[in-house]
Image (cartoon, grey):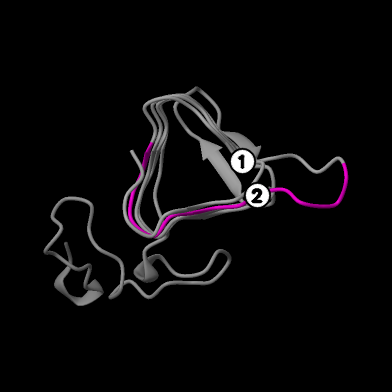
Amino acid sequence: MVDTWATVGSGAQIGADVHLAGGVGIGGVLEPAGAQPVIVEDGAFIGSRSIVVEGVRIGTGAVLAPNVTLTASVPIIDVTGSAPVEYRGYVPPRSVRRARHPAEGVPGRHVSPRMRSDHRSPDRVDRPEDGR
């Protein structure tokens, strides 16, 4: 299913039963010669306003949350096994990729404890002075 304002570039390969939500941009391949197309395998869901370019391959049944931008250089880290596995340009089958939340900060940059949500409650914010 292709929702309103979704764009699929020439050369992109979209599988069966794929849902491209509103405003999705799937890059095509025009040049250079030998460049890899974007491939979205069967049953995948691409969330609204997501952008997928540069020969990225989305596995069967994978889910991209809204506003995800994927290029061949964006790391996808699979933490389901005993050790993390890093992929670039590939989203494994039946996996979920979400966009980074602004409160998580930029990689390598410290985030204040007041900005970090506590894992026990989505409404609680860590406060060093309350001793919990």
Measuring from the top left, give residue 75's x and y in whole percent.
61, 47
Type of residue at label 1? Answer: Ala
What residue is shown at x 40% (from left), y 65% (from top)? 104
Q: Which residue is mark 2?
A: 28
Residue 56, placed above or below residue 79: below
Q: Which residue is at the front of the view, 81 or 76?
A: 76
Measuring from the top left, give residue 6's x and y in whole percent.
42, 54
Q: Give the quadrant of the N terminus.
A: top left
Q: Which residue is mark 1?
A: 12
Q: Is residue 26 magenta?
A: yes
What residue is shown at x 16% (from left), y 61% (from top)? 132
Q: Please, what secondary structure does the residue beneath circle 2 have?
A: loop
Q: Please, what secondary structure does the residue beneath circle 1 have?
A: loop
Question: Do the CB atoms of the residues marked 2 and 1 lie less than 8 Å apart?
Answer: yes
Q: Which residue is at the front of the view, 93 or 27?
A: 27
What residue is shown at x 55% (from left), y 64% (from top)? 107
Which residues are drawn in magenta?
A: 19-33
Residue 56, placed above or below residue 22: above
- Which quadrant of the figure has residue 99? bottom left
Q: Which residue is at the front of the view, 34 or 50?
A: 34
Whole-angstrom CA distance, mark 2 to mark 1, is 5 Å
